Image: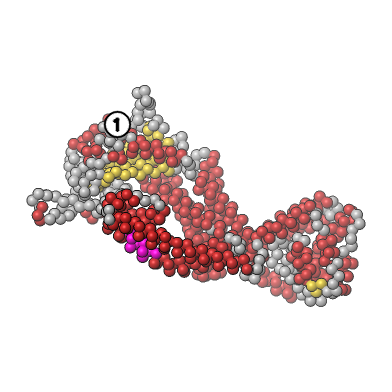
Amino acid sequence: MCKLTTPSPFPTEVKPQETGSGKKRSGCCSFFKGRNWFTTIGLLLYFVFASFELFYLAMSSRNVYGLKLVYLFRVLWNYGMFFIYVGLWGTTLTENTSDNRELFVRTTLRELLVYLVFLVDICLLTYGMTSSNTYYYTKVMTDLFVLTPSGNGVTFQSISSMADFWTGPMLDGLYWTKWYNDQSLQNGDHSFIYYENMLLGVPRMRQIKVMNNSCKVHKDFRNEISGCFDVYNEKKEDEVDFGLVNGTAWQYHNEKEIKGSAHWGLLTTYSGGGYYQDLNRTKEESAEILMEMNNNLWLDHGTRAVFIDFSTYNANINLFCVIRLLVEFPATGGAIPSYQIRTVKLIRYITYWDYFIIGCEMVFCLFILYYIVEEILELRIHGFSYFSSIWNTLDVVVILLAIVAIVFNVFRTIKVDKLLGKLLEHPGIYADFEFLAFWQTQYNNMNAVNLFFAWIKVFKYISFNKTMTQLSSTLGRCAKDIMGFAIMFFIVFFAYAQLGYLLFGTEVNSFSTFVKCIFTQFRIILGDFDYDAIERANRVLGPIYFVTYVFFVFFVLLNMFLAIINDTYSEVKEELSSQKDELQITDIIKQSYMKTFMKLKLKKEKISDVQKVLRSGSNKLEFKDFRETLKELGHADHEISEAFSKFDHDGNQILDQEEQERMKREVISAPRSKSDRLSRETKLRKLILFIKMDTL
């Protein structure tokens, strides 16, 4: 009673079933032994659906619409039972698909369909929390604080000295208390930049200094030069109180005390400590603070960087803008301004669309749990050889990035609520959103990378197709040749990079560092290059460098790369064209469509199909021929196998003349009217039911 003989749309058995009771029990035991406990629930549902099928079959045998309902029910049931039969986590790596091409294609198709749902879900939550408003918000803040000039014509971007720093347009941009006609905004002490963006808390200024005598002056100049302030290095950072001494602006605070973080500037990376001053909530009081700092030389020889940090919030679009303006004062003198504006969505759930995204996030978590179990099962079966496939490694990377994203999502929500609560209680403090904005940006970057990998992973499920496999086969075959040739290519490439750095590094910005030289040479290959700059730097060696680099790297080496790939692609394409056509996904879809269409519309009659086979006139009918003919007509393997086994009494997989006549007498008799046709259809249904009950 344990032999399951349900006609499935995804057959795995292609031979007639054995009739011995001993073999039935053996098959049953191996079935339960080879499946995991997730299938147990599926088996219970299996028998429930089987009971419903028998009921509908008995009740609807007298009307054609009832038969259509049964056919539709059977199609849906069979597809559902396939997923249960193979287990919730059945994949090509957990199922034995090496000897069964049809099972491999169908399992891959099932994996692809599930993965496409996951892909749609991850796209919804990635793009659902992204808005084009972020660009315009960033642009507005950039124009105001970076490009807008002050009364004396100095913009932040044009700051070139300490004097320019004190006369910049910062205060005018930070404090908006009146309309354009001088009418008060009536917002109390709050500043609304451009009348829409609320300034959160107060801005903070922080500087980092280096110690005097942090470098050595040559003995010939010691009488003229009394001090030496080296380039910034964390070990040479000045931590001594100076100036007025009293107040945070004149006292050093380490990174932990002010909860700061390191910053990667244009010249170097700066620590999160230093001397800081929080401004006030009004323009007048802030101007007084800046005047006092200016008069007492808050900036001096040791100053290497000044940070200005503040945050705004726009309730119209629910976005935070966290702004950091940085002016670096190199040891050479002068000033180098830069800025960092992060527009992020820290309050996640307000609108109906946001709550829809919550649903997508829940589905995403379920998918990640599903794929975690799947990877564990596959790893348990294959061991560490599982990681020999790049696709399996990519699966693990996607899951790990997703787990980190889920954890950060929870952390960010808790942290923002806590920070906003503190800010509402004390509106006059500095609103430190820098930490959250930084990690929110990394979170967005991580989601972007994860989505990229998720799309690339689609190739895993379509690469079994002959056309789709050309790319992966070509790259896989020529990988060794490319790696070998790449060594020679990069030897020449880096030799030219060093040459360019030494020749033009003192005068041309794009060659000022070795890393910039590398990217500049890639730009030369793409045609994006300022030739006049290197010619002005060196009128002799500049043209020689350019001509020889373009000739050897672009015309010779780069085209050899393309030749290797093109030659390998031709070989792969020729081999694929000579291979025997295997079962493809389009064949499976076509078969399923034809079979479903046939059953729903009653376009085919099983009796007439069997008649076509038996009219061949052969004295001996082999199972192979019997199966192939009915398979082309859209019948399932299990149905074909059951019908053949019923009349193949000697079990030799051949129907002799006597066995064929018995099949004709018992089953086949051409209908002469519509009622006869329905009667024969019912009779065939009862025969199939009889076969099932007999095997049970």
Residue 627 placement (x, y as % from top left): 76, 67
Q: Is residue 141 above or below residue 486?
A: above
How packed mark 1 is, by other alpha carbons closer than 10 Å (few <14, some 14-19, many 20 or more), is some
Quadrant where the N terminus sits is bottom right
Residue 648, image quadrant:
bottom right
In the image, which residues are magenta?
489-497
Identify the residue shown where x is 47% and y is 69%.
Answer: 480
Q: Is residue 387 left or right of residue 685?
A: left
**Whether residue 52 is visible:** no
Q: Main secondary structure of the magenta part?
A: helix
Residue 259 placement (x, y as % from top left): 32, 48
Q: Is residue 358 above or below residue 657?
A: above
Residue 327 placement (x, y as % from top left): 28, 44
**Whether residue 85 is visible:** yes
Identify the residue shown where x is 46% and y is 34%.
Answer: 316
Identify the residue shown where x is 29% and y is 31%.
Answer: 283
Residue 43, image quadrant:
bottom right
**Secondary structure category for the residue under label 1:** helix
At label 1, the amino acid type is Lys
Please name the residue that numbered disc 1 is placed on: 283
Identify the residue shown where x is 62% and y is 66%.
Answer: 577
Q: Is residue 195 left or right of residue 688?
A: left
Quadrant where the C terminus sits is bottom right
